[in-house]
Amino acid sequence: MTETPTRPAPKPRPKRGEGQWALGYREPLNKNEQSKKDDNPLNVRGRIINIYSKRGFDSIDPADLRGRFRWMGLYTQRAPGFDGGKTASVPEEELDDRYFMLRVRSDGKLLSPAAVRALGTIGQDFARNTADVTDRANIQYHWIRVEDVPTIWDRLDEAGLSSLEACGDSPRPFLGSPVAGVATDEIIDGSPALDEIFHRYIGNPDFSNLPRKFKTAVTGHPSHDVSPETNDVSFVGTVHPEHGPGFDLWVGGGLSTNPMLAQKLGVWIPLADVPDVWEGVASIFRDYGYRRLRSRARLKFLVADWGVEKFREVLETEYLERELVSNPSPVSPVGHRDHIGVHDQKDGKKYVGVAPTAGRVSGTMLVQLADLMDAHGIAGARLTPYQKIVLIGVEPAAVEAVVEALDVIGLSARPSGWRRNTMACTGIEFCKLAIVDTKERARRLVDSLEERFPDLDTPITVNVNGCPNACARTQVGDIGLKGQLVMHDGEQVEGFQVHLGGATGLEANFGRKLRAHKVTSAGLDDYITVVVTNFLAERTEGETFSAWVHRADEELLRGERQLAASAS
């Protein structure tokens, strides 16, 4: 009997390089990497000032227009007349309008009345009175002409503000606690660290070519008021039994189409060392981050592949050249804190948090706010990661007058739960990636739910997003709405995929998606009404909406059956 010769096992194919500079993969791997190699994006500032603002929109190099402009906080906005079905089906240049969105960083800064007024007059004079508060604590304008950009930058410079690296593959705007330095229950004030990180690294060519965006958050408040679970790098207030207050380090958070919660290192970092550790984390991302595929170019993928132990080892040995002090991570709070309402400061004054509807304000509203701040001697304002504004340093005797004056200009310090807890991204009105309307839809939804549930006794967050990119943190809202086109009566109409029961804090998780379940935009109010009614009817004492969702029958979540309203 002849033996059949055995074939040698096939050699495994070598794994393709992920574009990691530290491993020798420095060649241009896609058009974005090629563009950054061709010219440092920071150099586009000079061309905007000296060429494009003088010669107009048609003079802009396409590589600058759709790439490097982002490092200056500028994106072309969506041209009018393109519905959601055109978002991914027409060339990008066809969606480009001749106007820009401009983001202005706040980075946890206390904005003086003069700075708030400058932000308002820019909206009035150059942006058709637009000015939205984003959940990255930016002010975002629309209808900006390239001819006006140098003048806008001059005004921002005078106000101590900047749009530098507000977009692009760079250190995006920082999130800081809106009540840093004043809250009575604050563990530690992280503002000095944010200021130092900005001073050292924003506009620094060593960090202007990262694999993709890099989002930073710092808070010393026990409510974890900067959504630290969803940032690339977060420093979260903690206490060491011997060394006292400092910060834990969380890395690798991010949402979009592959959501991941940040992983906690369980360390203690003194305030003075936070900028050095930030540099170490950003350097790991720059050197080891995946550059071959844009879809895997966020820090979260590297952290997921390495694990937090290896990440810490590389940080300590290759970048810090010292060991970090181990310390249990701080206890997470239930839910989030947006600081709405009137609260005590440690110096005896008050801070007052107000809620624009879905972050929508205007240049005129900001000028009115600055006038109000001057009239009542208010020290300053901070923008929040929940599209809110917090006024700092209000005299106790002036509180009621301030609250009444805020109501007059449309900024409520005592809003309904729906107005307080609804966020929305830019949406199809201006964004080239969006598929559905968000801001106006969110406003109408809030009005409707205020009528249907005027006395809601528990917070339910609603996060409205115009596409899968989760700029409004869709997956961590109680009710997260991801915009898409859905079929209704044989036609494509605006609608949403629903995520239910997402949360940050102690119950941190991603919202539950229901198989093949979509809701039309027109039917959204009725759908949410049924789901909320079911929650109120079936909840146990003290149970949150998120906790209920994760035990509820699917038919109750789909809105296919409505329970009788609770007598309570």
Image: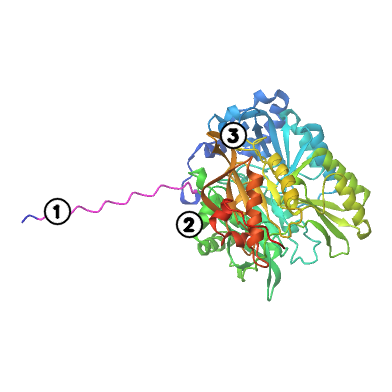
Can residue 15 be seen from the camera position used here?
yes
* Along the viewing direction, whichever of 74 and 97 lies nearer the viewer: 97
Which amino acid type is marked by label 2? Asp
Does the segment drawn in magenta span residue 457?
no
Kindly identify which residue carries mark 3.
Answer: 84
SS class, disc 2: helix
Q: Which region shows up in magenta?
A: 3-20
Which amino acid type is marked by label 3? Gly
Kindly identify which residue carries mark 2.
Answer: 305
Mark toward the start of the polypeptide (2 vs 3): 3
Is the Cβ of the residue at disc 3 closer than 8 Å to that at disc 1?
no
Mark toward the start of the polypeptide (3 vs 1): 1
Give the class, few, some or many, for how many residues have Cα within 10 Å of label 2's Cα (few <14, many ≥20). few
Residue 63: quarter of image: top right
* Along the viewing direction, whichever of 238 and 553 lies nearer the viewer: 553
Q: How far apart in space, not on screen, are marks 2 and 3 (Cα)?
A: 35 Å
Kindly identify which residue carries mark 1.
Answer: 5
- Image location (x, y in percent) of residue 469: 58, 44
Does the segment drawn in magenta span residue 15?
yes
